[in-house]
Image (cartoon, rainbow, N blue to C red):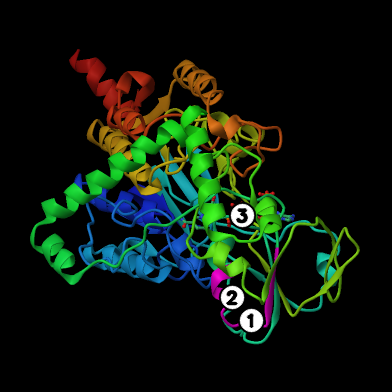
C-alpha cells in the first residue's frame, strides 16, 4: 500500500471542537490540515441530535466560539437546528470544507517513533499520516440502548434521543420516554403536544431551574452586527454570571443549598399536585448531575395526556413496559432518552503510542491526561474534551476554546522547532492529576449521586474541579518544560556539529 502523504495536522472529527481547531491552526499558519469525519456532514452532536425540542441549555452567545460570533441568534437559547446551521456557516465562512474527508471512519491510530508520524487507518483502504493529531471525536458521539431486560422482545418502535426516527409520526400514538435527563426534559414537552399519551419513566428526579429564554430583538441583532464589541460585552456578562454559579454548582457549599431552595420554589410554583411534587423532588446535591433548565417540562408532566411513572422498570415486554408494581404499559413507541455510550477510556478505536502502548489499556480503569490535553506515551497528540475537562456551571465551548489554544501552541512548537515529538513528562502528568483528584473531593459531582461523569467505581475522569477562568489560565500556558522534546535525528546531528 502506498505511503500516505504526511500532513502537518490530522483532526479527528468535524464537530464544534474539530472545526474550531482547524480555524485556529490555520490562523496560526498551520495550513496543511486534514479533517477526518465519519459522517457525511459537519456538526457532531448538533448534527446527530434532531429530537423534537432539541436546544441548548446554555445561552448560545456563550455556547459559541469567541472568534466566530454570530450576531443573528434568534433567541437566548436557540434550537438545535439554528446551532447546526451556525456550524455549517462557520465551516463555509472559514473555507474548511475542502479540508474535510467525509464518510471516513478511523479504525486505529498509531505513532511511528522513528519518523515522528501518526498514521490513521480507516474503514476504507485509505490511510492518513500526520506529524500531529487533534482528537476531537467527542465523549458523547455514540449512543446505545440501555441494557434493560426484555428490550429485544419489544414489538413497537424504539427510538434513541440521539438518533431520532423522523419517519415515526407520534400523532395519536402511545409513547413512553425512559429517562429524565437533559435530553428528556426537552423531548417530553414536544411529544405531549401530539401524542395520544406520554408516559415518562423516571429513575432519579433531577433539579430543574427555569430557562430565562427571550427572543433577540432585531435592534439588538443589528447592534451586534454593527458593533461586535457590544456582543462581546454581552458574552462577558454571561460568562461572569455563569462563573459565579460555580460557587454553588461545582463546590458543595451552603450556596448549593440556595440552588436547592430555588429548585424547590420552581417546583412549588409550577406543580400543583403534592404527590407529583414529591415524586419530582431530587434527593441529591444540585450540580451532582447536570442541572436541568426548562420552563415547559413540569407543565408538560401535568397535562391530561402525560403521566410520570417512578416505579422501577421490571422488564420491557413485547407490548410495552412492565413496571415492578406489576402494571403493563402498552405502547406504540419507546423513546430512550437514556444517555450515551460515554468514551471515558479514550476514542472508540485503538490508539497506539510510544513502544506499542495502548491508550485504551492505560485508560481502561481511569483516564488521565496533563491539562486534559496530552497523555504521557502518546506524543504529538492533543485531546479536545479530554479527561477532566468538563464544566458543570459554564459553557463547554469556552473550555473547548482553551483546549484549542493549547493544542495550537503545542502544534506550532512541534512544527516551528521541527521536533520529532513532544511527550508530556510522566511525573508532570502524575502531579497534575493528583492535584485534580484532590480538588475533586470537594465538588458536588463527588457528593454521592450516580452520573455519567463517573466510572462504575466512582472515579471522576470527566470534570474540571475549578472555575472556567482557572481552566483557561492553565490552557494559555503551554510550557515546553512540561514535555520531553525529541528532535529529528538529522537536525540533532546538525545541532551537534555546529555546537
Ligand atoms: P443523561 O443525562 O445521562 O440522562 C439519562 C437519563 O436516563 C437519566 O434520567 C437516567 O436515570 C435514565 N436512565 C439511563 N439508563 C436507564 C435505565 N436503564 N433505566 C431507566 N432509566 C435510565 O442523558 P441525556 O439526557 O441524553 O444527557 C447526556 C448529556 O448530554 C448531558 O449531561 C449533557 O452533557 C448533554 N446534553 C446537553 C444538552 C444541552 O442542552 N446542552 C441537551 C441534552 C443533552 P438516572 O439519573 O437514574 O441515571
Classify the position of ligand 1 by quadrant: top left, top right, bottom left or bottom right. bottom right
- Residue at which label 1 appears: 195
* Spatial CA span between label 3 and label 2: 21 Å
- SS at badge 3: loop
| Sequence-wise first label, 3 or 1 | 1
- Residue at which label 2 appears: 191
Q: Is 127 included in the stretch rendered in magenta? A: no
Residue 366 percent across, percent down from the top left: 62, 31
Residue at disc 3, CB closer than 8 Å to ligand 1: yes
| Residue 286 position (above or below residue 432) | below
- In the image, is 265 to the left or to the right of 92? right
Mark 2 surroundings within 10 Å by alpha-carbon count, few (fewer than 14), some (14 through 19), many (20 or more): many
Q: Nearer the viewer, residue 464 or 418?
A: 464
Question: Residue 381: which disc?
Answer: none
Q: Quadrant of residue 495?
A: top left
Q: Are marks 1 and 2 in contact (CB under 8 Å)?
A: yes
Which residue is at a point 48% across and 59% down the rendered structure image? 294
In this rendering, the label closer to the viewer, 3 or 2:
2
Query: Seen from this angle, which residue lies furthest right?
Result: 326
Residue at disc 2, CB closer than 8 Å to ligand 1: no
Amino acid at each position: 500500500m502506498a505511503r500516505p502523504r504526511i500532513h502537518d495536522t490530522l483532526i479527528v472529527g468535524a464537530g464544534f471542537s474539530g472545526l474550531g481547531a482547524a480555524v485556529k491552526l490555520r490562523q496560526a499558519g498551520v495550513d496543511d490540515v486534514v479533517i477526518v469525519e465519519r459522517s457525511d456532514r459537519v456538526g457532531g452532536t448538533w448534527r446527530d441530535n434532531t429530537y423534537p425540542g432539541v436546544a441548548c441549555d446554555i445561552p448560545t452567545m456563550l455556547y459559541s466560539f469567541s472568534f466566530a460570533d454570530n450576531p443573528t441568534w434568534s433567541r437566548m437559547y436557540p434550537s438545535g437546528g439554528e446551532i447546526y446551521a451556525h456550524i455549517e456557516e462557520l465551516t463555509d465562512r472559514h473555507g474548511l470544507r475542502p479540508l474535510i474527508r467525509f464518510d471516513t471512519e478511523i479504525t486505529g491510530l498509531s505513532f511511528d517513533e522513528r519518523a515522528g508520524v501518526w498514521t490513521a487507518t480507516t474503514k476504507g483502504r485509505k490511510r492518513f499520516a500526520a506529524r500531529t493529531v487533534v482528537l476531537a471525536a467527542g465523549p458523547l458521539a455514540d449512543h446505545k440502548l440501555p441494557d434493560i431486560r426484555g428490550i429485544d422482545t419489544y414489538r413497537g418502535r424504539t427510538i434513541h434521543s440521539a438518533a431520532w426516527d423522523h419517519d415515526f409520526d407520534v400523532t395519536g400514538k402511545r409513547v413512553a420516554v425512559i429517562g429524565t435527563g437533559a435530553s428528556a426534559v426537552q423531548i417530553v414537552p414536544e411529544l405531549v403536544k401530539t401524542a395520544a399519551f406520554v408516559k415518562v419513566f423516571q429513575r432519579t428526579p433531577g433539579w430543574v431551574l427555569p430557562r430565562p429564554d427571550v427572543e433577540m430583538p432585531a435592534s439588538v441583532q443589528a447592534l451586534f452586527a454593527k458593533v461586535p464589541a457590544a456582543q462581546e460585552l454581552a458574552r462577558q456578562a454571561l460568562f461572569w454570571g455563569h462563573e459565579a454559579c460555580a460557587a454553588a454548582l461545582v463546590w458543595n457549599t451552603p450556596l448549593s443549598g440556595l440552588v436547592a431552595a430555588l429548585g424547590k420554589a420552581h417546583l412549588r410554583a409550577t406543580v400543583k399536585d403534592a404527590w407529583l411534587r414529591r415524586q419530582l423532588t431530587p434527593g441529591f446535591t444540585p450540580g451532582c448531575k447536570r442541572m436541568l433548565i426548562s420552563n415547559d417540562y413540569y407543565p408538560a408532566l401535568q397535562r391530561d395526556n402525560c403521566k410520570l411513572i417512578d416505579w422501577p422498570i421490571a422488564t420491557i415486554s413485547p407490548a410495552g413496559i412492565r413496571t415492578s408494581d406489576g402494571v403493563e404499559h402498552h405502547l406504540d413507541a419507546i423513546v430512550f432518552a437514556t444517555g450515551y455510550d460515554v468514551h471515558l477510556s479514550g476514542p472508540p478505536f485503538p490508539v497506539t503510542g510510544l513502544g506499542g502502548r495502548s491508550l485504551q489499556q492505560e485508560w481502561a480503569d481511569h483516564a488521565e491526561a496533563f491539562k486534559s490535553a496530552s497523555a504521557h506515551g502518546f506524543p504529538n497528540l492533543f485531546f479536545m474534551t479530554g479527561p477532566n475537562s468538563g464544566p458543570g456551571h459554564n459553557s463547554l465551548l469556552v473550555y473547548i476554546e482553551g483546549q484549542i489554544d493549547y493544542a495550537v501552541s503545542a502544534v506550532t512548537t512541534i512544527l516551528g522547532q521541527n521536533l520529532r515529538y513532544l511527550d508530556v513528562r510522566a511525573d508532570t502528568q502524575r502531579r497534575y492529576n493528583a492535584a485534580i483528584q484532590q480538588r475533586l473531593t470537594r465538588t458536588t459531582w463527588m457528593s454521592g449521586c450516580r452520573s455519567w461523569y463517573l466510572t462504575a467505581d466512582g472515579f471522576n475522569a470527566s470534570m474540571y474541579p475549578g472555575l472556567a477562568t482557572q481552566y483557561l489560565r492553565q490552557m494559555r500556558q503551554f510550557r515546553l518544560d512540561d514535555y520531553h522534546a525529541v528532535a529529528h535525528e538529522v537536525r540533532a546531528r546538525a545541532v551537534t556539529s555546529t555546537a
